[in-house]
Amino acid sequence: MTLQITETAPPRTEKKSRRKAGKTPLREQLIGWLFIGPFGLVFLAFLVAPLVYALYLSLFRKAMIGGTSFVLLENYTKAFTDPSFLDGAWFVIRFSLVLIPVQMLISLAMALILDIVTSRFARFSRLMIFLPYAIPAVIGALMWGFLYSKNFGPLGDVFGLFGATAPDFLSRDLIFYGLLNIVTWQWAGYYMIILYAALQGIDPTLYEAARIDGAGNWQITLRIKIPLITPALLLILVFALIGTLQFFNEPKILRDLAAGAIGPDFTPNMYAYQQAFGLANFNYGSAISFALGAVVFVCVYIFLFATRKRGSFLS
Amino acid sequence: MLFAADLSIPKGTHAMKRKHFLSAVATLVLAGSLAACSSDDDGTNSSSDSSGGGGSDAANCTNTIPKPDLPAVTLWAWYPNMELVVDNFNELNDEVQVCWTNVGEGGDEYEKFQTAIAAGTGAPDVIMIEADRIPTFQVQDALVDISDYGFEEVRENYSEGAWQDVSVGDAVYGVPVDGGPMGMIYRKDIFEQYGITPPTTWAEYEQAAQTVRDAGGPLFGDLGANVPAVMMALQIQNGADPFTYDTDNPENIGIALNDEASKEVLDYWGGLVEKGLVGTQDQFTPEYISGVINGDYATYISAAWAPGYLTGAGVGEGTDAGQFAVAPLPQWDPANPVQVNWGGSAFSVTSQASDPELAAQAAFGLYADEASLTDGWTNQVIFPLNLNALEDPAFADLQVEFFGGQQANKEVYIPAANAYEGFTYSPLQQYYYDAMTEQLGALNEGSITGSEAADRLQEDVVGYAEEQGFTVE
C-alpha cells in the first residue's frame, strides 16, 4: 500500500515492457497465465460468480403467497422508490459528507506533525494513533457502546463534574455523532499511516531548496508537502467514500444496544441484510445490494470527475 | 476449472501442449487443496460449530452420543441447560439419538434457519423456535405437521392453550416446552419506601408511578423499543386482536394494529414516557440490567422466565438479595382480568428432516422427562408447559429465592398460565416486530403519539402483507 503512493515513479520502465507485450511469445504468455491463474480462479469463484448469481437473483420476486416470479427490473424500481432504501442511502451520503473531511483533516494533521517531530515519543505516538485500526471493528463498536453508556460509561462522571447531564450518543438524535466518533477513531490512524508514508517519500532536497529560498515551516507544509501528497489524499478519500457508503459493522453491532435509534434499515447494507436473512427475501436483498453498488459507483464517479486534473493514482 | 478452460486458447507445438497439461494439473492441484482446506475446517470445528451448515451433519454434535449405533437426529436449540436435556433424552431413548448444536439464540438462529430454507439444505431435523415464529416458517413450508406422528399420545400432557400457540389452523407444528405467563416484578424496598402497594390496574400503576416520581423516586418501569412482543401482549390484554390468520385460507390475513384497544395501550405508555414516569431504555442490554441492579426501575413488566434471566445477569445479589417480588399483571378492567404471555419456545420438525417420524419422536421426547423438567424449573430456566411439571405440587410450592422465598408460581404465574387463552401469531411476525420497534423508538423520542404510532404501524404492516401477496381483510 505505502509503496504504491510514494512519489518515487517507476512507470517509465513499465511502458517499455508494455510496448513489447504484443510480440511476447506464446510460451511467455502461458507462464503469465500460470502466474495469475491462482488469483484468477479465486477471483472468478469468489467474486465474479457470486456477483452474477446475486444479479440473477435480483431479477426475481419472491412473495410468501404466490411464490417466485421473474420480474426483470421491478425490484430496482421498487428499491429506488423505497423510503427505507432511500433514507438509508441518504444517511450514508450525509455521513460521508461529514465524516470524510473530519477524518482527513485529523489524519493529515497528525501525519504532518509526526513528519516534523522525530523524537522517540513521535514513534510511540505513531503506534498509538495507529492502534485503533488494529482493533477489530466489532470489538471497537462494542467498546464504544460501553463508553457511551449512561450507567457505567465515563461520560456521566465527566459531565457530572460540571453538573451537566451527559449526552446520550445512543439516542436517536445523537447516534449520528456517536457513529461518527467511532469510525473516525477507528480509521484516522490508518489513513495517517498512508499519509505519513507519502510524506516520508518526498525528496528532502526540496525542503532544503525551499529553505534557501526563504520558506518557513508553514509554507513548506502548505506549498510542498500537501501538494505532493495529493495522490495519497485522493486515495484515502476514495477508500473512505466506498467504505462509508457500505456502512454496516458499527451500526449493526450498536443496534443490540440501541434498537430504538438504529432501525433494521439504518443503512442500505443493513437493509439488504435484513431483507435477505431476516425476512427471507434474498431477491430484494440482492437488488438492494446492486442498487447500493450503483449509488457507490455514481458517488465515486462524481468525485473522480471533480478531481480528474489533480488525481493521478487512478487515471 | 474455469481457468483451465482459459488455458486451452493457445494451440500449437508439442511443448505447448505439455505446458497446457502441466498448468491444468497445477490448477487441479490448487483446486483440490482449496477443497481440502474447506473440508478440514468442517472436521475440526465439530463442537459448537456456528457456521450454519453444520446442522444436518451428524458428526457435528456438541454432545457425545452414548448409543452411536442408533440413528441420529440433529437439533438446534439454545436452552441454557440443553446439554443435560439432550443427555437425559439420549439415555432414556433406545430408538433414536439426538445430536445437538447451539447455533445462536433467537434471531441468530432464525437467520441461519432462514438461510438453510432458502438453500434447501443445511437445516437440522428438529429446531427450537419461539411459538410466535411458527407461522413465519410454516408459510414457507419449512415445518412438518406432526399431528400424525404420535401427537395423540402426548396431547394430554399440555393444555389446549399451549397447543394453540404452536398450531396453525388444525395442523400442529411444534411441541410446546416453556411459556411466559406475565406478571409485574417489583422492588419491595422501593415500594415500602414510598408507601405504595402493588397496583392491580393500569390506572393504579400510573398513580403509583406519579407518587414515586413526586417523592423524587426512581423510574417506575421501562418501555423498551426492542421488546415489541411485550407491547403486543399488553395490547392483546386490552382486547386487541392484531392478526387473524388460518391455514384454511392462507392467502387471507386480518391485520388490526390501530384499533381503539391498541391505541389506548400505546397512548398510555406514550403518556408514561412523556411524564417521565418510565424509562426508554432498550432491554436485555448491559445498560438496562445495570439500571435494574442500581434500583433505577421500581417495576419490570415481564414473564415467568425473568427471575432466571435476571439472576443469571447478576440482579438480586448482595444487599439486593430477596428485594424483588412479583404481583399479577395490572389489568385494564379488573372485573374481566386477562392474562397474557411473552416468549416461550417449542421443538419443531423441519421439512428437511430425512425421517420426520424419527425427528418427531425426538421433538416429543426432548425436555419432557421428569429430570430435565425439574432441572429446568428449579433453576428457573423455563416455565414448563408440560402438565406433569405444571401440576406437580413441588413446582407450585417452590419458594423462589430470587423473590425472597415468595411462592411465585402458585401466587402469580400458574394462575396466569391457566387463564391464558393463546394468541394468534402471523407469518408477518418478524416484519411486524421490526416495524413496532421503529414506532416505539419514535414514541420514546416523543416525536409521535401512541395513536399515530398505531396508525403508522398498521399502514406499514398492511403494505408489507400486500406486497407479499396476501389479501388483507
Image (spheres, rainbow, N blue to C red):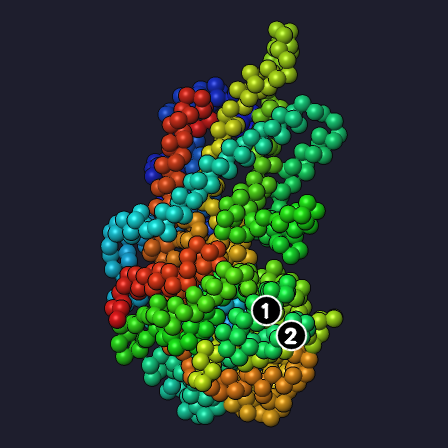
**Residue A203, which numbered label?**
none
Q: Earlier in the sequence, mark 1 or mark 2?
A: 2
**Residue B211, which numbered label?**
1
Where residue B450 appears, as percent x and y from the top left, is 41, 63
Q: Is residue B34 above or below residue B272?
A: above
Residue in the picture at 60% in, 83% down: B408
Q: Secondary structure at mark 2?
A: loop
Q: Nearer the viewer, residue B188 or A53?
A: B188
| A155 on left or right of A249 | right
Residue in the picture at 53% in, 58% down: A256
| B419 on left or right of A196 | left
| A69 on left or right of B267 | left
Image quadrant where residue B165 sits: bottom left
Which part of the image, by quadrant, shows the C terminus of chain B?
A: bottom left
Question: Dot 1: few (<14), some (14–19), or many (≥20) neighbours within 10 Å?
Answer: some
Residue in the picture at 53% in, 67% down: B105
Marks 1,2: beta carbons within 8 A = yes
Residue in the picture at 51% in, 38% down: A99
Where residue A206 appears, as percent x and y from the top left, is 60, 13
The answer to whether dots 1 and 2 both sit on one chain is: yes
According to the image, label 2 marks what residue? Answer: B195
Type of residue at label 2? Answer: Gly
Q: Secondary structure at mark 1?
A: helix
Chain bearing mark 1: B
Quick check: can you spot residue A31? Answer: no
